[in-house]
Every structure is written in C-alpha cells, then in structure tokens.
Image (cartoon, rainbow, N blue to C red):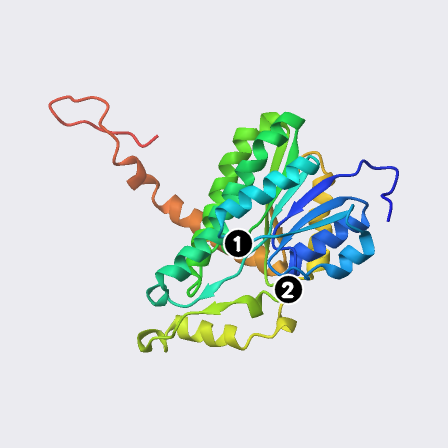
Amino acid sequence: MPAPADKPVRHWFVTGASGGIGRHLVEHALRSGDRVTATVRRPDALDELRAAYGDDRLTVEILDLARHADVERVIDATLRNRPVDIVVNNAGYAVVGAAEEMTVEQIRDQVEVLLLAPMLITRAFLKPMREQGGGRIIQISSMGGQIGMPTHSSYHAGKWGLEGFTESVSQEVADFGIRLTLVEPGGTRTGFASAMRFTAETAAYRDNSVGSIRRYLQNVEEEGMTGDPARIAAVVYDTTRHPDPPLRLALGSDTYDAVRAALTERLATLESQREIAASVAFDHHHDHGHGHGHGH
C-alpha cells in the first residue's frame, strides 16, 4: 500500500512487536503510511501484516534481546537500509514472586530484557539520530516504573532503572532534537498476563501479601484490565507527531490513580524530613566549637 502523500514517510524500529502494544503500534504506523522494522522472537509472528503491506513497508527481524551481539547486528542492518526516525523499546514480561524466591537467572533475565536491552538499543540510535538532526525514542515503561508492589521486585528494578536512564539521556540529547518519552500503561489487555513467569512458591510467603497477589495474578482475567492496546498505540503515535512530547505519559486511570497516590505519599514523607535533611550540614561558624546550622 502506498503511503499518504501529505506526510513524509517515517521509519520505525519496534521491539517485541508480535503482540500487545508493540503490534498495535506497528499496525498503526503502517496504516498511517510509515515504514516499520519490527523485531520478534517467532519468525511467523507478523506474516499477515507482511502479506498486507509488503516487504518494502514492513521488515521483520528475529531478535532475542538477551543476546547483545544479535541486537547490534540487527540495528546495523536496519540502519544500512534507511535512517530510523522512531525507536520503540516495547519488549517485556514479568517474573512474579518474592525476591527471595527468584533465581539468579530470573533476576538477570528481567534486568537484561527490561533495562539493559533498551539502554543498548537507545544508545545505538543516538549517534545516527544526532547526525540526521533528530528522532524519537519511546520507552514502554509501566505504572510499575513509578510505584512498587510485592511480587514484582525485579520487574520494578528494570522499569525504575529505565525511567532513570531515560530521564538522564533525555537531557543529554535535547539539544540535538532527539526526544524521549516514557509510556506508563496500567493494566492492558495485551496477553501480558499470559507472559508472566512465576517463581517456585515457598511456604514462608504463602500467607502474606506475596501469596495473595500471586494467587490473584495466576487467575487474573484479561477482561479486568481496562487498557485498550489499540487506543494506547494511537495516543503514543500521536506523541510522535507532537513537536514537544512529554517525558512521561501516564495511560490508564489505574496508572493515574496509583502514581498520584505514590507521589503524594512520597512528597508528604519528604516534607516531614525537611529539618532532619538540613541537620546534617557542616556548621557555618565555629564559635567556641558550637555552630548553629540553619536549614535553608
């Protein structure tokens, strides 16, 4: 299908494109006339889109984000074909259970997929984007990048890490016309629930918050999740058309409510520590060895 003539064709690079928000973004970009390079783990995951749009509009790459050499190879190949305007780091899943129950492998893979891979992918695109005069990098974070709950410690470590990394990099590259946005969806009907991996349960955690959340998540119905991935994709797409997109984009009333409550509580706690925060400074004047520090 030819692109609409009124807009320049942009090239997207989307990870984890076989399902959920990633797939909806790929479809939305293609419908809007853009080109997409999509990474998936299953070769046939996007066959119907390839049939509909053709290889010139949609390039599918097989990529396991935990294999760093593969990440570099795919990005090099992508940039050889044509410049990339918009990068979407979307791939992810959650390990569910108490921190004590998680294996080293589970923890490491969470951090590899949720944090290290997006860091390396972001970094790889900065130089070409800088040289072409700008670009967009969309990090699909989560309400879990702003709040913490039991059973998701490694997931939160990855998402909070991604938020800090992105906030820092966004300031480094603002002068070059590169804009980064953290998208924070809440519960979304994306098959994410079926992509959860559970730790082996231990007796110690069976009857506390970990056990109750585990049982809730093992039986969670997608219908209970209010986020529509197609609508999320449409909103995210719109931000790429906006000259000054937000650093953080909270999507879902559940995200809005949970993040607002968490930030309100953090701010109240911070306010209560104002005096003790000021109390650890060196005294300004040492008269008779007794200084009086002023907490300003």
| Three-letter amino acid code at the position of disc 2 | Thr
Could you tell me the amino acid type at mark 1? Val
Q: Is residue 39 left or right of residue 103?
A: right
Looking at the picture, tell me which residue is in the foreground, 69 or 140: 69
Q: Earlier in the sequence, mark 2 or mark 1?
A: 2
Q: Mark 2 = which residue?
A: 190
Q: Residue at x 72, y 40 (%)?
A: 11
Residue 31 image offset from top left, x and y in percent: 81, 51
User: Toward which corner of the image does residue 296 lie, by quadrant?
Assistant: top left
Q: Position of residue 55 (x, y in %)?
A: 77, 49
Q: Picture coordinates of residue 88 (x, y %)?
A: 63, 46
Q: Which sits in the foreground, 28 or 262?
A: 28
- Residue at the spot x=37%, y=77% of the render? 206
At label 1, counting other C-alpha atoms closer than 10 Å, the crowd grade (few under 14, some 14-19, many 20 or more) is many
Q: Which mark is residue 259?
A: 1
Residue 84 in view (yes/no): no
Q: Is residue 145 above or below residue 171?
A: below
